[in-house]
Image (cartoon, rainbow, N blue to C red):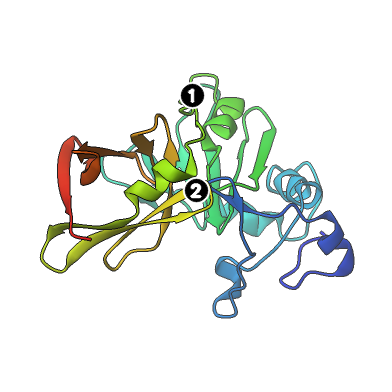
Amino acid sequence: MKATKITFDEKMKQNLAMGHSEGAQVANWDIPTLAGAGAIRSSLHDMLIYMAANLGLKKSKIYPAMQLSHQARHDKAGRGTRVGLGWHISKGAEGDVIWHNGGTGGYKTFSGFVKETGKGVVVLTNSNKGADDIGFRLLNSAAKLIEVKKPDPVVIVEASILESYVGTYELAPAFNIVITRDGTRLFLQATGQPKVELFAKTDTEFFLKVVEAKVTFSAKDGKVEIMTLFQGGQAMPWKRIN
């Protein structure tokens, strides 16, 4: 596994697919403490070698230790998943699916295998959206794929309209939402929280991508006075204070 290291070499840098979160490229994480828990970089080729070794298809001196790691050590109460040494073990239509997943900033991964079928799968994504369902389906014919929700269409709103929404909106004393604009982009920032982008569905209705929520703006006598946040089944009106 020559492409599996903590520190990138030049060839690994050339082959790197940069991570993405909510469609935006993000920097790689470096984890100097407990590097084995998230700082190891690898490739699809190397991970398939690792799967083959776990299945006994590729000879390895540590295969007996690998077999020990596949044995269930704990049964997670009522969840149908057992735990081995570093592996999760779930029932499948063709045999136990021995698997693990993980993620760092901008990446999600899945690997697993079924001894009865001799099949191993590795799914790597350079996105914060996982693909565990694809991995499970490839290993277990009874597993269901997650239906991907079609994204809401985004429209372009005139800068003058966006500017009319810029300001501070109050829900309670010392708890505000600040709306700012950068060209044709609108941003929302609640007290004590990071700034997130709003995406226009209409001239007055916007949605967030980081969480399932939407925002509408209401005007009276030509001036925007109320911003309503719809989230978790609730409608929360915020009054403009400047």
**Quadrant of residue 65 in the image?**
bottom right
* Residue type pointed to by label 1: Lys
Gap between marks 2 and 1 measured at Cα:
22 Å
Left or right of residue 80, residue 98 in this image? right
Q: Residue furthest right?
A: 11
Left or right of residue 217, residue 175 in this image? left
Is residue 231 something that shows in the picture? no
**Quadrant of residue 9 in the image?**
bottom right
On the image, numbered disc 1 is attached to which residue? 150
**Depth check: 169 or 63 in front?**
169
On the image, numbered disc 2 is attached to which residue? 185
The secondary element bearing badge 1 is classed as loop
| N-term-proximal mark, 2 vs 1 | 1
* Residue type pointed to by label 2: Arg
**Depth check: 186 or 4 in front?**
186
Is residue 5 something that shows in the picture? yes
Q: Position of residue 141 (x, y in %)?
A: 55, 19
Q: Position of residue 62 (x, y in %)?
A: 72, 60
User: In the image, is residue 25 above or below residue 159?
Assistant: below
The reply to whether the C-beta atoms of the residues labelled 2 and 1 are less than 8 Å apart is no
Q: Residue at x 53, y 51 (%)?
A: 183
Q: Position of residue 61 (x, y in %)?
A: 77, 60
Q: Residue furthest front?
A: 221
Badge 2: few (under 14), some or many (20 or more) residues near its Cα, within 10 Å? some
Q: Residue at x 65, y 40 (%)?
A: 123
